[in-house]
């Protein structure tokens, strides 16, 4: 279960980031992925969840209406978060559960993007992509997304080529696309889906739970596929364990190779790593 309290910790995290940036050099940021727009563009009516610091109180004094300032970056730059909700993401326990960990990474991007008055979009995907946000890039929207993510029951098979290609067609402006997934699929399909997104800045969070790095048992065992009805009986000995570890590592290397070829940024995220350590590796560039 994802609790909204971690959003308050994100506020402290971002404040620490800002202090770090200021201590390096005036005007220098630790990341250029989600820059804060400084050029005023327009006003829009205040909505619950908007940051109070963007309210124009002088305008309120004249009109008795609440308006927030919009900036040029909000118009021109959007962060798109795509979280894998296929059945293989329903793995791990408590804080190490893959889908919940991946969703928190995505929610962190959405929350800090809204805090920097940029726009975000948030979607889950399996065979298709489903957008969850309502187009309101504010704190209230993120709070609602927390509830929606908690209601997700990971299921089905991830169709990277179809789901990501279809989603890419909806991107209309300069964008950063953050894909949070275990990438347990054919690398050709992953390549096809990510290639459709490659005209944007792309960040891949490859989410791995500790229990899937090694075979969890020994002796005669029946293994059941998470994304199909297939099962296989095998004797788990030292040779099979080594073979499994090698194949698992080879697949992760192949996914990283796809990212490198497409000039996407790749981060392998272990769910037994403290969340803010992993998030910092993704957010800071």
Image: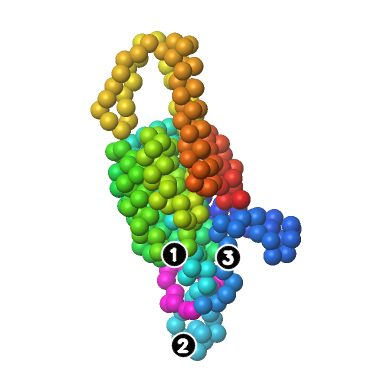
Give the residue number, with chain letter if any, for mark 1: 173
Closer to us: mark 1 or mark 2? 1
- Identify the residue at image location x=56%, y=71%: 53
Q: Is mark 3 on a helix, strand or loop?
A: loop
Pick out the residue farthest to the bottom.
62
Quarter of the image with the N terminus in it: top left
Q: Give neighbour class at mark 1: few <14, some 14-19, many 20+ (Cα, 10 Å).
A: few
Q: In this view, does 256 lie to the left or right of 234?
A: right
Magenta stretch in the rendered image: 42-54
Q: Where is residue 116 in the image (x, y as percent from the top left)?
A: 55, 64
Q: Position of residue 110 (x, y in %)?
A: 47, 56
Residue 53 lies within the magenta run? yes
Q: Can residue 276 be seen in this view?
A: no
Q: Does label 1 or label 2 sit earlier along the sequence?
A: 2
| Quarter location, residue 276 | top right
Q: Position of residue 104 (x, y in %)?
A: 47, 47
| Quarter location, residue 183 | top left
Location of residue 211 with respect to 8 vertically, above or below: above
Give the spatial CA distance, label 1 vs label 2. 33 Å
Q: What element carries label 1?
A: loop
- How was this image coloured? rainbow
Give the residue number, with chain letter if any, for mark 3: 36
Give the spatial CA distance, label 3 vs label 1. 16 Å
- For the image shown, how many numbered marks are present on the structure? 3
Give the spatial CA distance, label 2 vs label 3. 28 Å
In front here: 204 or 94? 204
Give the residue number, with chain letter if any, for mark 2: 63
Q: Does label 3 or label 1 sit earlier along the sequence?
A: 3
Location of residue 214 with respect to 1 vertically, above or below: above
Location of residue 253 with respect to 82 vertically, above or below: above
Q: Position of residue 214 (x, y in %)?
A: 47, 22
């Amino acid at each position: 279960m994802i609790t909204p309290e971690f959003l308050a910790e994100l506020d402290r995290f971002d404040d620490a980031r800002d202090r770090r940036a200021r201590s390096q050099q005036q005007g220098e940021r630790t990341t250029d992925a989600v820059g804060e727009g400084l050029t005023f563009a327009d006003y829009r009516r205040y909505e619950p969840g908007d940051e109070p610091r963007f309210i124009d109180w002088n305008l309120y004094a004249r009109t008795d209406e609440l308006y927030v300032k919009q900036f040029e970056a909000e118009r021109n730059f959007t962060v798109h978060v795509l979280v894998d909700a296929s059945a293989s993401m329903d793995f791990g326990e408590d804080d190490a559960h893959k889908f919940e960990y991946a969703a928190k990474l995505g929610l962190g991007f959405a929350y800090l993007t809204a805090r920097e008055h940029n726009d975000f979009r948030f979607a889950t995907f399996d065979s298709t992509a489903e957008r969850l946000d309502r187009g309101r890039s504010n704190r209230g929207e993120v709070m609602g997304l927390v509830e929606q993510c908690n209601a997700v029951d990971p299921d089905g098979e991830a169709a990277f080529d179809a789901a990501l290609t279809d989603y890419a067609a909806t991107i209309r402006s300069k964008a950063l696309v953050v894909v949070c997934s275990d990438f347990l699929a054919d690398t050709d399909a992953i390549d096809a889906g990510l290639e459709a997104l490659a005209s944007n800045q792309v960040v891949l969070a490859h989410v791995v739970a500790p229990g899937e790095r090694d075979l969890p048992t020994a002796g005669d065992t029946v293994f059941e596929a998470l994304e199909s009805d297939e099962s296989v009986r095998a004797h788990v000995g030292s040779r099979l364990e080594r073979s499994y570890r090698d194949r698992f590592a080879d697949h992760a290397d192949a996914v990283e190779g796809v990212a490198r070829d497409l000039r996407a940024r790749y981060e392998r995220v272990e769910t037994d790593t403290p969340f803010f350590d992993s998030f910092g590796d993704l957010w800071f560039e």
